[in-house]
Image (cartoon, helix red, strand yellow):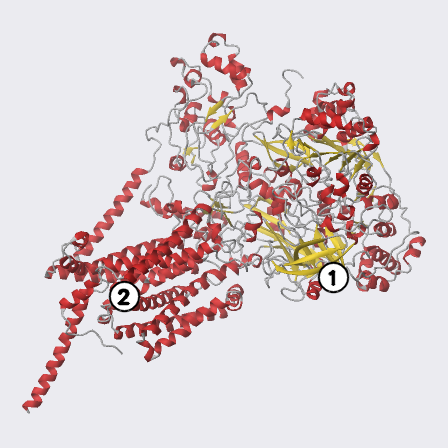
Amino acid sequence: MSVSNLLENWSKFRHTHPVDDKGHPDWEAYPSDIKWAMSIDLDACTGCNACSVACYAENNLPVVGKEKYSHGQAMHWMRIERYWDESAGVGEFDADKGARFLPMMCQQCEAAPCETVCPVGATNHTEDGLNSQIYNRCIGSRYCSANCPYKVRYFNWYNYPEQEKVWPEPLNQQLNPDLTVRTKGVMEKCTFCKQRTYTARNNAKTEGRPVQDSDVQTACQEACPVGAITFGNLFNPESQVAKQWKSQQVELTKEVQDKDEKEGNRLRGYRILEELRPYPSVMYLERVRESAV
Amino acid sequence: MQHILRLFILLVGLFAGAGSYAADAAPKLTTPDDLGPQIEQPIEFPHFRHAGDAKDGGMQINCMYCHTYARRSMVAGIPPVQKCIGCHQSIESVRDKPRIQKLFEYWDAKKPIPWKKVHDLPDFVRFNHERHIQRFYFQQDRPYQEVCGYCHGNVKAMTVAQRQKPLTMGWCASCHQKDHPVSANSTETGHGPNDCFTCHK
Amino acid sequence: MTENDFNRRDFLKVLGWGGTAVALSGCGNTSIEDGKETVTSYVTLPSYVIPSISNYFNSTCAQCEAGCNIMGRVREGRVLKAEGNPNSPINRGRMCGLGLSGVQAHYNPDRVRQPLLKGEAITWDKALGVIADKLNGVKGAEVAFLTGNMSGHVQALLGNYMDELGSKNHFSYEAISPAVLRAANKKAYGVSMPRYRIDKARVVVSFGADFLGAWVSPVHFSQQYAQFRKGSRPEGRGVLVQIEPKMTLTGANADRWIGVRPGSEGVLALGIINALGKAGLAIPADVAAASKAYTPERVSGETDVTVEQIEKLAALLKERTPSLVLTGSAAEGYAHGSQNAAAIALLNRVLGNIGKTVEASASVPFPQIAPTVGNRASLVSLNDGLAAGKYKVVFSYGVNPVFSAPAALKFKDNYAKADFKVAFAQYLDETAQAADLVLPLESAMEDWATVVPEYMAAPEGAGSAGYAQMSFRQPLMDKLYPDTRGIGDILLALLKQRKADKYKEFDDFYAYLRSAVLKNKVALGGKATDDDDVFWDETLSKGFVPMKGIAGAVSAKASASDLRLPSATADQEYPLRLIPAVSASMRDGRNANEPWLQESPDPLTTIVWDSWVEINPKTAAKLGIVEGDIVEVTSRSGTIRTQAYLFPGIHPDAVSVPVGYGHEAMGRYAKGVGANVFAMLDAVFDKETGELALNETGVKISKTGQRVVIVKEEGPVGGSQAGKKKIAVQVAADKVDLSKEV
Amino acid sequence: MGKDIREDIAWAQINKDVLKSLESPRKLYWVILLVAIAMVGVAVGCEIYQYNVGLGVGNFDNPNVWGLYIATFIFWIGMSHSGTLLSAILHLMHADWRKPIYRFAEAMTTFSLMTAGLFVMVHLGRLWQVYYALPYPSERWVWPNFQSPLLWDAMAIFTYLSSSVLFLYIGSIPDLAICRDNIHQGWRKKLYSILALGWEGTDRQWRNFRITYLTVACFLIPLAVSVHSIVASDFAMSQQPGWHVTSFPPYFVAGALYSGCAAIITLFIILRYVFRFEEYMTLPILKKTVRLTFAIAMVWTYLNCIEFAATWYSHDEAAKAVLIEKATGRFAPFFWGMIFCGSVVPFALMVKKWQTSIPVMFAVSLLLNLGMWLERWMIVAPTFSHGYYPWTWDEHMWPSMVQWGIVFGSFGWFTLLFMVFCKVVPSVSMYEVKEMVYHRSLAKKKEEQAVKEELAAKGAN
């Protein structure tokens, strides 16, 4: 450790981005052979909330209760948004074609707006392409949340485990020992079930083989009754998620996708707020509605 | 202007001083062992007797004979009482020793032994025994006592285990920064992961 | 048991809190500690238990009657999470939010922990003694046993017990049950619960069947739905049309949601048949006769569905076959509910779906473990008996009629008339509070049971026609409270009171179950030569056993001769129709004390921790109601106060309040949350089955002048994307080629 | 219009008048001090509560993760700027009218920075871990994230604070020596002896003093500009609609000078009244300050217009939506209040009759300050409740009493510091007033000489 390390060390945070300082994507520079990514088929998604509850169960999320929920202090890493058709104009709702559901969680952006602004480097990019959130490093400045375009970061406004007692005995026995229970004053968010991807990588490494789709499922993906969520290694061309991204011609490193679409053959893949250039790792597939009825 | 110059020199000197202090403050693997407190255990387990070298009267049992989960799990595990009994029921010669009697008391009552945890990392840290054992014991083929000793010190010389290494973050990181050969006969080297997320859960 | 054999419960003990401790306050312990924490080693440990690595034990979900096969994730003796059993033909490895919350029923802080005699804790011996005393000299006909859906060996034991008592009064009651559907199916197809093949259909027209939410076996149907929606399927992407006055989760996912006038579903079905005939489909003569009068114009007037829409729908149904027409609670909850269901079933006959997308199902070959399905008619007959003072001792298990019976039945008062009331309960709910003796039950993650699902899903492939299965529920961890007991153990103890000899070989229900299963090894897929222990262990590790079931047969015998569909009549005093909404997570409210369910927003309104009344914006504008107004919803039988939510997915003549809220007891998470809509339902019954007609209550709405900010997930712009085009994108099916999608 | 400082006032008189302000305070002083302490007490209570229970008690939510604390933080940072303007910039420009009033303005700088610093602390979720943000070499091998504007911010404030303390102190040394020489007993004597650093007023000391003072003044000016530019980059460097604006740094600096000048007018009037400094804080000085304030107000208004126009002409729909939301949504009263206080009220400064009217200027300066506080709030809050993602828009979040209490208390804290300062250090710079009087009397003498000579010449003729 020396002064020279000062410069060396912090610059490491950025070098895991495939997006270099000039804003050009550079896959070759990617530091590992894993890039976790997801795709969510909105046509399949029924909005049933199973993923969200699974997330509560897997990730030790506190139930905040009505009063705190009313203050917007809910801690759901995975929230289901419900939209209506607005055929007659913005805000004029039309229920004839049902509702539209959108599961929204941390998009694990490659050039994440949250990472650069954290004063203490508590959130930074990992080699397998996640936005990490190091709870113990967080000092609670909430700048990351302020800069998140999706607002998918959730702050511990209270000391849920100890003072608010959201897990009264014996509910606390359900807590997952693979990850911490966050205390007050730290930011948290979806980690793509890091404890699961970590275990998958660990097991694959022990067996001396690359990670496969069958090694890991996120909790939401595992629960989803309609299998709308696909998760895996985008770098592995055999993975379902890579196949989906490819077939939808969505590329991680582009902020505008130039798709080869013919008349009557729209490709459904898109990323939300892509134009802000955060390079999100979650691709959504458009919802389809029959026009013949 | 002389004064400004003096001030400038002073500031530069301060910064350089702080920097060189920092260089010294970085923990090294060779720092003298930082002995943790002596811990009172329900049974004073003699590690030296079981794992120690033959010349010291030990039996040179592999650490992973008892701490059997270390190579396949995050935790090394404390052996179930059954494991102790497995051997000790056929070792009549020490049956009357008070420690063994205590052990059999637990066994007869079918009660678990409430061991105290010696190497206790903070709750937000994930340390994976499996990964380290795989890396150094199986892959690089180092002797098990050395591999376990990286973090646990010279347990084979202890009675009740005692913490010898600092186990602080900088101490972990200092080893993760170092290049280690990837296998026994390889000149290729690699270092441990430096992602915060790997160890912070 | 031999020395080496182990009682699995021993290893489910919560021991390893140290070592792989749950990080309870993540950022609390920030230092390296020596010797502060205790890491307790096991005494003995089977080889498959490795600390820090989860073990999965198969079991069966008890959160609803679908009976999904689950795996409990167990670590260091604690069950952490329920996950789907991938081999299950029911849920195929998937879960719903309700099922996932099962662990919170198990770890619930509000469980009853000791037997309670009039509120005072007593021992089990004393409790069982009291029951023996009270039964002394009571005739069998004076004992009633009220349960919900029952199946498997617990039911067999219950049957034995009722026989011993000489009682025939086993009432099986479910507040939310597809009872009308069963009767209508029996009439129309010859089986009460056929296999629906949504995955095979090209068009599904669902009359209020919320098969993605809370209807029959939602996770199974979600699996089928996923197939149905796949563009790469040979049949292409399926089209879902949902016809119902109040949008359900399924309606929200439909290609076309048709907000029909409440009660006129049967009329619409006949109108569609009429239009199909006009479009050139061959209609059987009797059906044609029945539907002749229902011209699209007339139907349009009665149902509020445009002629164009009816014709479009008919054209679609004619063009794309096979299709599937479902009928659900929204169409059935009327005095003419059975008629509605019969009319809708005609559509399947006309379209030739019977045998194609409506398949025969099989039932288990053992009638004593076959499911006894609950309905509301049985509660009515129990209630009548109680009112007449017929029953002296009443047992209740797994149901909460004091909460869920319509107020008009005055069930609570009648229940009090029985001399001695025993409730087997996990929570001190409304019924348990009204009971004299409360016996604490083990949770579904602690006790043994076998479950036979009513809706018998089958795996793909040959032999699926005669497929039946029995699922096992086994303890996933040691009992949290030593003084709780499984229902099977309690029934066994009660049986021993009457016939000690016959049951003396069984120490506990586990022994009974094991011997009963092993006796029928061959029928359960084993060989007579199989070792008992091996067979038992294998069976448990699979979580369910397939059996050769008794295959039923579907027939297209739906008749159109005796259809009588009344036209809607306007009620001047109570102009709006109340539709009690059954949500996927809250159901009938028995799981209301699981905080995850309270905190997960209702998918459609995104409201949490409260009930609400959904009002169409047009109706609300007429009444001068805006979102958040506290309104009084008044029927002939009662009044509730709740918050108003303007909802575009509801017919202007209808309002909807979710059921399951408004508990006055049960626990900290359920008590006082929302209003109980059961308390204001009129006692109107389906004319054929005697089922309570849930949607038959007329209400009026008045403002109270109070206004609140509704606690919900959506923001002030509601479901608007505020002009942003790329958030939740929707595309017309003809703009996209789905056939080659990965 | 009142009179300016008399040129013929005796130096001893200056000493006497100014040192009088250090004597036992009047009753009014104690009343103000007690009120200030009470206000601080409220804030401390709120902070203890918030510290123990968590930031949730402030009614923060997702997405409104920042609230009044950051707004008020910028307000206090901004207020500090005018002290530097008056004491350093005008010093370099040899504007001698600054001399009687720069001392308290500089003190204002220091104390408002100290207040602002507290808001950084109050804002943090885990105050007890604040040292993670310091770039110190640690055992953990990790440094703060130098990319984060928040870190620049912390460093800038710290540098600025230490420089202004230094500047304030250096500038006071000759006066502290006067105090030392004129006060003959008690702890104060000792204090002044130590603080005066053995000042004797020798030529060499004066020469060194002037060089040092000038150097620090030069050093301070770029700092002052940069510190608020960096505060601006907290917002401008982020990607949020309404924040991602290139003109933010000058806009913030202008706003800072503006609020600072307004605060100077307020304090000027209070000090003049409380310490009877009519002799030194004369109305012509007030007039000059008022005119300066007006000029800055117009610059600020101009930059405000630029910000709106830039938003309007850019094709950023989200930023436009935020602007419309500010002007028409639930923040409209505050937004238009800011426009009124910030751009309309300053025209009162141009009414000649009012420029020297104490009550009018007092009221106007308070309104200007209010406007500037609203401006900061309008920068922070609407972007949160109307960001990129419509689903998370929010209409109900309102700061709780805890937030208001801490903001309220911060004014007490500032007052407390300032009041104590006024009783310890002369709030009018005696030696510089003497300089000023000397220079003016020299000039007058010259003038008189010239007149005399002229008369003499005339007489000779």
Foreground of the two, A48 or C431: C431
Q: Circle 1 marks a residue in which chain?
A: C
Q: Nearer the viewer, mark 1 or mark 2?
A: 2
Q: Is residue C217 left or right of residue C628?
A: right
| Label placed on residue A239 | none
- Mark 1 crowd level (few <14, some 14–19, many ≥20, 10 Å Cα): many
Q: Is residue D278 left or right of residue D332?
A: left
- Image coordinates of residue C294 in percent, x first then y, are 88, 60
Give above or below for A32 relative to A148.
above
Q: Is residue D139 left or right of residue C249?
A: left
Q: Is residue B74 visible?
A: yes
SS assignment at label 2: helix
Foreground of the two, B119 or C169: C169
- Residue carrying label 1: C652
Say which amino acid is labelled 1: Pro
Give above or below for D314 relative to D351.
above
Q: Residue furthest bottom?
A: D461
Among the 4 quarters of the image, the one containing residue C498 = top right
Q: Circle 2 marks a residue in which chain?
A: D
Say which amino acid is labelled 2: Val
Q: Is residue A24 visible?
A: no
- Image coordinates of residue C269 in percent, x first then y, are 84, 55
Q: Residue furthest left?
A: D460
SS assignment at label 1: loop
Q: For the residues marked 1 and 2, what is the alpha-carbon distance in whole angstroms?
A: 71 Å
Give above or below for B10 relative to C10.
below
- Residue carrying label 2: D274
